[in-house]
Image: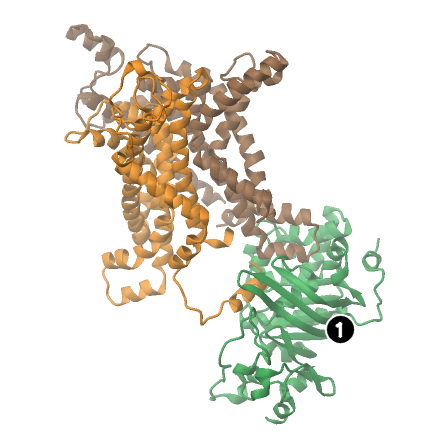
Chain colours: A orange, B brown, C green
Amino acid sequence: MSDANVQVTAAVVPKTQKTRSLWSDAFHDLRKRPTVVISALVILVMLLIGFFPGLFNFQGQNPKACDLALTRGGMSGSHWFGFDEFGCDYYAQAIYGAGPSIQLAIIVVTATLLIGGLFGVLAGFYGGWVDAIFSRAVDVFNSIPFLLGAMLLLTMFRDWKIPGLGTRFQAIIPAAITLIIFSWTGTMRLIRASVIESRGLDYVQAARSLGASDRRIMFRHILPNAMAPVVSLIPLSIAGMITAEASLSFLGLGVRPPEITWGMMISTGAGYFTTGYPRLLLVPSAFLIITILAFVLLGDAIRDALDPKLR
Amino acid sequence: MGRYVIRRLLQAVLTFGVVMFLLHYLMSLAIQINGNPVRTFFGDKPVSPELLAATKAKFGLDDPCLSRVGDPCLNLFGKRMSDWASFDFGTNFNRADVSELILNAIPKTLQLFLIVTIVWVLFGITAGVLAAMRRGRFLDYLVRIGTTLTIAIPGFLLLILTQKIIGVWLGNWAREEFGRDSVLGIMFQPSYNARYPWLTLLVPGIVLGIFGIAGITRLSRTSMLENLRADFVRTAKAKGLRQRRVTIVHTLRNSLIPVITLIGFTLADALGGSVITEGIYGIPGMGKLAYDAVKKVDTPVIIAVTAILSVSYMLVNLLIDLLYAVLDPRIRYE
Amino acid sequence: MSDVKIKSEILPDADPTATLLRVEDLRVEFHTRDGIAKAVNGASFSVESGETLAIVGESGSGKSVTSQAIMGILESPPARIAGGEVLFHNVDLLKLGKERARRVRGNHVAMVFQDALSALNPVWTVGFQLSELFRQHRGMSKKDAMARSLELLDLVKIPAAAQRLKEYPHQFSGGMRQRVMIAMALALDPDLLIADEPTTALDVTVQAQIMRLLKEIQIERHMGLILITHDLGVVADVADKISVMYAGRIVEQAPVLETFATPAHPYTKALLKSIPRLDTKGQRLEIIKGLPPVLTNLPPGCNFAPRCAYAQEICTRELPVLATVAADRAAACHFSSEVIQDV
């Protein structure tokens, strides 16, 4: 920004005005924007569908009770989206298909924050050889293109079962672990950078001179500030994970059957698109795109609100 | 400059070694956990221990470490590396020579990525730069909506939809209207056609390019915006330079440096995306090899493809980092 | 074609006998989210060839905006020139077409910026950035342009100039970088040089060297010099006259010596008291209490009134205009005669 503009804005903002924190300022800004409100509502609905599909199963159809006689049957009042190739109710499938992807995305993003956050703080705080080891590890994981690495892992271990897990988790966890392995590096690098930045700040030095322990400085003083850039990226990360899972499902490598996901529905529905049943592709695609779009729009808005200078 | 280059090269060698070891370890681990794949050759048929042992020996899968879960099989690592270094990836379980499969597939993938790179530079950077220069106006909003959509629509879905809509519907119309061998009729095809390699690669190439274009466009835009308000741009104006020179020589040149690095990283997404693209469009490249291998659980092929694409990716990024030093003198004299 | 001929072609209507630069009632606004900020509210001043005018004020007083308005390099939007004239040899620079205004920059009016590290492009060599002036404005060959650039570096006393042409800005020390900035501004032999806080980013010893260099070259070339600064210490040494700006207005205008001896505006007086001096050693420096006003919401009356020791009721009601208080001297204060006498 030119010097003149800085000076003007500095003089324009009245010092007496109630100073609001960055976050509450951003929140006030966001609340007024229609795209944000609509995206937030869509996300809320999709989360509800993902965790309580029964609430939205208005006709009480069982997604797994299929009748081959009804294969690719048309839409009707009690079967809004008709039937798929095996004669299963397509609306119920779409509703129950939300859960695995959304739950997986949330698991992966949470784990990424924890792992990447921990490693990032350690690397940024201690520097030296600790940093060198973590940074080289990041290099290694970043050297393998994500989808290729995920394909490799999931193909190699496709028959591997984790003992003692319920069906839902058995279906989700292999894909989740794979996605975590290839995505913690991004969080780690962000956290590391902001920890290095805040390590030298006055209040950290002050805490240190008062005899605070390393652990206390790291987790009470540095981490809360260093988290901000990562936290603001959560909606975008969730969108990315839903996309990644759908791509893997399309290859038959994501969430495992018997669970249903939109990616699997798209994969099978694609074959019927030009043979008179475009709905079998379009219904799951619409669900998927609307969900991802909502997360992306919200995520973009949050990021812009926290860093408004380049909006 | 020398120190920077040496440090970067050492890092690359180290990373390369670790990646190779990880791939090797994964291969061993998969056998240790899932059981020796040789057994699956014989299906349900009963097989004598001697025949089994002989087959294992033939595929080099007879080392006892392969039955100890977690054993890194270091003794096999050296052998595998020297095999890979001489471009020998063994045979897959259909007894096809993996190296040959890959050699035949490389040109198609290169062709595809040539198109992808052109799309990134031609559309991605241009759109970002123009959006920054028309900030807050129609074009800026258009670019922003466009990039948001390319993020929100998963690549594989975009590929399926374009294949069906452009390849089938639009293509059928074009073939009816202009004839089977018209340019449009060939270009808008649902799958690759070896008789017209470039024309039929165009649509899937552009769609694959759209995979990573949002990041490139957005970074071009922000980088350009940041530099447009830089002090040195104001100096350039104060020097009475023409607007075009201020924009190109004093803003664009500086803005492109981070974008080039991002292009290197975006390559990773596109390499993964090439599996889906080549799979859906039936392009006989490396991605198609991996796509088919996934369906057939053909591990040796997946490993070989992953290893080669990872190494190419590392090489490209190494080159970009060295190029970075050429483009940004502040790095050069660090 | 000779430099002089090229330059006379840019402004054929210029009257060389008229005042070098006369700014009349300049007004600049910034359109921000919080409303319209009036950064410059009717500034008027003039400079003759060979003369040095110092424009003094705090951050946000509008002095940098004024200089950029003269140069024609304000970002618009958000900036908008709301009125006034910038007369260069009697030609209004604000009314020139884009192309002509561009050619005036560098050829007739040039500028030295504050922080040379950020004001020079980090990815081009110093030689490139100097020689492009000759190549773009004079159409010289690469070789000739480089030769001229070398002369320039010699002019601003940069040692080993031939070698340094090939180096990048970050390889220079702060003082040397500022010399490069000055060389760049002098390249096309401008008639008016605007130096916006040219020494603020430098060490004190280097500051003095740079100011001396600027002054030498100014005298040698008989240029007009506008020195933008917040540092009254610098002003005393080099300036002939001074304009004090506050909240986008000029509040006092006078020859330097008179201003320093008997300031006519309470703000100038306060500024003078806030510089450390040898003869006040041991005494506490005075600071100006309060903050500059908010430019989007200027109250009626005198903008300095809330911080002013002389303020009376009239000051919050009526805006004082810049009025003559003595020969060559003007001040915008209802009580300037009292301020002058009050030592």
- Is residue C334 shown left or right of residue A193? right
Near-viewer residue (A293 or C193): A293
Q: Is residue A262 above or below residue C237?
A: above
Q: Is residue B32 above or below residue C26?
A: above
**Can the viewer see residue B322 in this picture?**
no
Residue at figure coordinates x 54%, y 55% from the top left: C170
> Residue B124 at x, y = what percent?
54, 37
Near-viewer residue (B26 or B88): B26
Chain where mark 1 sits: C
Residue at figure coordinates x 71%, y 74% from the top left: C44
Q: Is residue C52 above or below residue C128?
A: below
Q: Residues within 10 Å of mark 1 (few under 14, many from 20)?
A: some
Q: Quadrant of residue B221?
A: top right
Q: Quadrant of residue B170?
A: top right
Q: Quadrant of residue B182?
A: top right
- Is residue C316 shown left or right of residue B298? right
Quadrant position of the C terminus of chain C in the picture: bottom right
Q: Which residue is mark 1?
A: C50
> Residue B246 at x, y = what percent?
65, 50
> Residue B39 at x, y = what percent?
21, 12
